[in-house]
Amino acid sequence: MRDGSIGGDIAGPVTDAHCQRVATSDIAASSGYIAGPVYDAVMFVGAPLLALGVGAAISGTALADEPLRLWGHAETATGIFIGSFIMAHLVLVVVRSHGNPRIFARHRWRFVGVPVLLWLLLWASDWALAIAVVVTVWWDVLHSSLQTFGLGRIYDARRGNPPALGRRLDLGLNVLLYVGPLLAGATLLAHLAVLETFEKVGATVFRAVPVYAEAQQGLLARGLLVLGGLYLIVYVLGYLRLARRGYRVSWQKLLLLVFTGLCSLVCWGFDSFGEAFFVMNFFHAWQYFGLVWWSERGNLRRRLGLERARLGGAAALLLMVGAAFAYGLWAECVDGREQRAALGLTLVVSLMHFWYDGFIWSVRRGEV
């Protein structure tokens, strides 16, 4: 379902009659939560603030500054943890994609054939491997903003709003809140450093990109500040217009956007790369664990034969988290530079996670 052109209606082609039907819909607006007040506050809405608090608490401590060695992998304790957490949340997608029979039956080829073919390609081609490394880093940036976008759309649906209403406005705002501070901040150069991967296959043309970006950083920051401010005005005016025509405001989505924007601005704009990387990835992975458990807990208990067990829920949760972190710790500590097959596997898991998330969670199909 498309939202239509921004030119005629900044929020999409929504007629007065349609909004009137929304306002008088037979689908009564619920409390607006995904799971409940406490769960949502901890796992979704308040996750960016939680991550900021955790990041501030460990900054400057031995956990963040003193390296340790685990299975030959030298890194700080926080580095090993966040790396494992990231990898764990990436593989967690299989609970939804492969573990949910209804979802798996709908996209069988994408879940079985594509990953195998991609891994073989990465194993056989240096160019494919280099491209996958670069794409993974930058797709992750966009993907992170889309997760917040998706949560916001779920909150809108919980208030009884149709899936297309304000969709493009939200999409633009989430990309701006997450990607804008990154492009304008000091951590841009750290993200561009991944382009050095192409030098390993003989392509030196990208070597000048970080140098040019550093020289134009000030201009880029000022341009994003102006464009971002203008877009915020467009966003607020767009939703004020929709509110007058029947849109039901979700305060949960509003707080989620405010907290995410604040977190992104503080991290990418002012923090060191290490602290920003920790905080932004912590709350992203934290939210994803919360979303997968909320969505798949019943199915997971049935698949594990724990549906009638007294502590079946706790056991299923423990197994889910344990299995995800087992992979995460392995993926973080394995030396992918020396073990090409392992590097290819971690890249496949990452890329499939980004791709799968685009269609296995759908507000428009009523799947979340």
Image (cartoon, grey):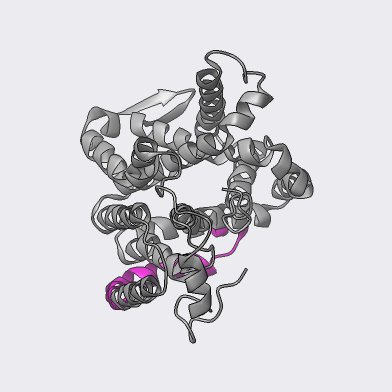
| Region in magenta | 198-226
Q: Return the x and y of residue 230 as percentages of the image width and height.
A: 31, 78
- Describe residue 312's horizontal placement relative to residue 74 as left or right: right
Residue drawn at (30%, 76%), measured in percent from left and top? Answer: 233
Drawn side of residue 273 relative to residue 94, left or right: left
Q: Do we see residue 337 in this rendering?
A: no
Foreground pick, 280 / 348? 280
Question: Image check: 115 left or right of 57?
Answer: right
Q: State the image coordinates of residue 85 (x, y, percent, origin top left).
A: 45, 35
Residue placed most toward the observer, 154 or 171? 154
The residue that appears at 62% across and 16% down in the rendered structure is 308
Rendered residue at 38%/59% (across/down) = 178
- Location of residue 265 in the rendering, given as x and y in whole percent from the top left corner: 28, 58
- Looking at the image, can residue 257 be seen? yes
Residue located 38% across and 41% down the image: 40
Q: Nearer the viewer, residue 68 or 207?
A: 68
The reply to whether the magenta stretch includes residue 42 is: no
Q: What is the magenta segment's predominant secondary structure?
A: helix
- Callout count: 0
**Percent coordinates x, y for residue 59 in the rendering:** 23, 38
Image quadrant assignment for residue 238: bottom left
Task: Give the camera-side residue of 318 and 126.
Answer: 318
Outermost residue toward the top in this view: 310
Image quadrant in which the N terminus is located:
bottom right
Quarter location, residue 177: bottom left
- Reply above or below: 25 against 293: below
